[in-house]
Image (tube, grey):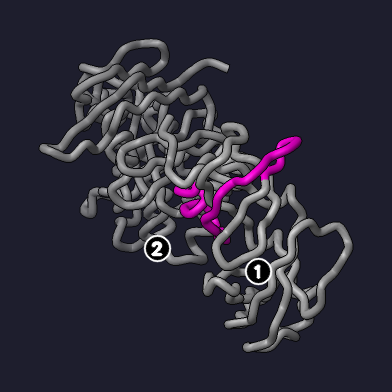
Amino acid sequence: MNESVVLDGVVKTHGPIVAVDHVSLSIQSGEFFSILGPSGSGKTTVLRLIAGLDRPDQGEIVIQQRIVTSDSPHERPVNMVFQHYALFPHMSVFDNVAFGLKMRGERPSNIQKAVGHMLALVRLQGKEKRLPGQLSGGEQQRVALARALVNRPVVLLLDEPLAALDQQLRQEMQGELKRLQREVKATFICVTHQQDEALMLSDRVAVMHGGKLLQVGTPQEIYEQPVSSTVARFIGLSNLLSGTITRFEDGLCWVEHEGLSPVVVKCPPQGPSQGAVTVMIRPERLHVSAEVSVNGYDNTLPAVVNQCVFNGNEVLYHVRLRNEAIWMARVPITEAQGCPLTVGQPVFLQWSAHEGLALPTHPAPL
């Protein structure tokens, strides 16, 4: 697969603040790639650097094997969809989508054909004459996508594209975005702080924090094999516990924690080493019950139920360990049978060694 976008040692500062700190990244042609991170992580700055809206202080940006670091936005084969769509309120849907083609001097017949095709692709046939104010939020987002895609960019940049939508509409548009990306066969680069959005849409995800690139991988790799406790905290719910590795063997390590019995989990991704680590266990990996089971579990920690939350298809138990740490355990509703465990009830948390992971306490940027 050919590389569509490459960032090589890119640095961008805003006064004393390093917004992007020596980021190197390779995005493949036709990939749906998401950059995920909290506010201030540098993810939007990366998008603006690719678009040409900002210039890097160091490093190179390559698109389609051509160095574009010094090129202006209109010289790059990219288009961008902003968080608030930036539609022209006085123009019809048709004219909004046709705007870029008209600026390029395309023939009216070609514009008519291209806009018609794109509106069909985003399922807005019959709404060509409406103004943006007469459309729903989801329809406005589709107009913005059609306007960006009608120019056939090699790369489409999406800045928090679904943030302005309510929860139900956002979920619907996630499927639409993925469908569109497959049909137009362009490279989509999406910036978001929504974990579920990045995991659902993306072929690969990059996690940023403090201007640094912490990890790049498939959604499954990022979720199941985070490289640090920082990534684990940001991707999904995690039960975390600080401790010290005392021994390791066959890819497993034994970790001691103050106030708790030792646990055995998988060694850090970088390999085993003695010292301080953070143990991570996802809530769905925990078995929680009033009695100790002997079937296939390597770890057992006593706890007390703090809260029971019914979420429709699951029960989420908040439990307090003996060292006062609060952990969560997800139990499918078919197994939970309502909330049979009551607040204040003593329980046992159990998991196998391969369902937990020891992580470096501090992030290791790429």
Q: Is residue 218 visible?
A: no
- Mark 1 neighbour class, 10 Å CA radius: few under 14, some 14 to 19, many 20 or more: many
Find the distance from the CA under tag 1 to the CA under tag 2: 38 Å
Q: Residue at x 58, y 76 (%)?
A: 320
Toward the left, the furthest residue is 15
Left/right placement of residue 315 relative to residue 250 reads left
Q: Confirm whether the magenta stretch covers residue 259.
A: no
Q: Nearer the viewer, residue 162 or 318?
A: 318
Rendered-image quadrant of the C terminus: top left
Is 130 above or below relative to 82?
below
Estimate the x, y position of residue 348 in percent, counting from the top left: 73, 73
Q: Which residue is mark 1?
A: 329
Mark 2: amino acid: Ser
Q: Residue 83 in the image: state x and y as whole percent.
A: 32, 50
Identify the residue position indicated by label 2 in the image.
136
Q: Secondary structure at mark 2?
A: loop
Residue 270 locus on image (x, y percent): 57, 32
The magenta region covers 229-253
The amino acid type found where label 1 is placed reads Ala
With respect to residue 325, does 357 lie above or below? above
